[in-house]
Image (cartoon, helix red, strand yellow):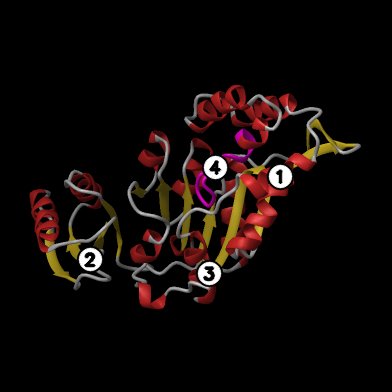
Amino acid sequence: MFIATLIAKESLNERDIQSAIAALDATGAIIVRQSDIVDDRAVDIFFEGDPVASRASLEAIAGEIDVAVQPENNRLKKLLISDMDSTMITVECIDELADYAGIKAEIARITERAMQGELDFEEALRGRVALLEGLDTGAIQQCLDERVKIMPGAETLVRTMTKGGSTTILVSGGFTKFAKPVAQTIGFQSFHANVLGESDGVLNGKLDGPIVDSARKDELLQAAAQEQNLRLDQCIAVGDGANDIPMLQRAGLGVAYHAKPKAAEAADVAIRYNDLTALLYIQGISASQWVTE
């Protein structure tokens, strides 16, 4: 048995549901039942059939509606692991930090290519960090204060899952100087990121310690699941770039959030229209159960 969850950016109506049922019928799926419309935005359709064909057919429905297709079993996840930049926050920290050095456009071009999977992540990261050599470390706090904004729905998602007993982990190919305050603000229980090298109050253009890249994110997911005695199908991963693909594919449910094409293709679910609270609807958690403070 599978669940197809429709989540509308504004409101969901009966016409949208009938379009979804017709799309599922076209794949040969057998509709078993459907839920009532939840919060005027979401509905679950339970069916038997081909989940891959069903997702493709449902994603072709008109309107600003996100679709998730997943097995009925283990819908409520016990571990959330998430990327930070452009996922839990609205910006790429290295691009914004580069603006204080007057080289944002140059850095941003490299960042975009790395996120698209066109460049080796570690090589691109070290190259960009080298360009920041000599920048006063005070720019980091200034960037945090002026540029870093929490993604809509992030705090509600993380705090709701934490209260429900889930483990929540922030993993970033960015920097600990940003990841630590972001994790604390949103409510993540732990974080992992890269360490910017600094000397005498300025960045030295180097990184200290091992790199948090795609392989490391995948390793952290597996290690956390093992530590918590969880199966991978009890885990949900969310990210937006090529660096997130291994963990998106490893987790029981990989969610690409407003993502680059390669990440969206690799993930089980692609959220294109809604904010991060969509991940709660996907788990069957309605607004009355959300933690908003």
Callout 1 amino acid: Gln
Q: Quadrant of residue 95?
A: top right
User: Residue 69 location, x and y as percent?
Assistant: 28, 56
Check disc 2 and give the amino acid type.
Val
The residue tagged with tag 2: helix, strand or loop?
A: strand
Circle 2 or circle 4, nearest the eye: 4
Q: CA distance from mark 4 to mark 1?
A: 14 Å
* First-in-chain label (1 vs 2): 2
In the rendered image, which residue does mark 3 sit on?
159
Quadrant in the picture for residue 139: top right
Quadrant in the picture for the N terminus: bottom left
Mark 4 or mark 1: name the one nearer the start of the chain.
Answer: 4
Q: Disc 3 to disc 1, how far (Cα)?
A: 27 Å
Residue lying at the far front of the rendered structure: 146
Tell me how far mark 3 sits from mark 2, CA to CA: 23 Å
Q: Residue at x 47, y 64 (%)?
A: 157
What secondary structure characterizes most of the magenta part? Answer: loop
Going from N to C along the chain, the mark reached first, 2 or 4, is: 2
Which of discs 3 and 1 lies nearer the camera? The answer is: 1
Q: Which mark is residue 142?
A: 1
State yes or no: discs 3 and 2 in contact (Cβ < 8 Å).
Answer: no
Q: Residue beneath label 2, please?
A: 43
> Is 70 above or below relative to 130?
below
Q: Residue at x 11, y 63 (%)?
A: 14
Which of the numbered marks, if any, corresponds to residue 91?
Answer: 4
Q: Secondary structure at mark 4?
A: loop
Alpha-carbon distance for marks 1 and 2? 43 Å
Question: Where does the magenta region start and end?
Answer: 86-95
The residue lying toward the viewer, choosing from 100 and 55, is 100
Q: CA distance from mark 3 to mark 4?
A: 21 Å
Tell me the crowding category of disc 3: few under 14, some 14 to 19, or many 20 or more residues within 10 angstroms, Cα based: many
Q: Amino acid at mark 4?
A: Val
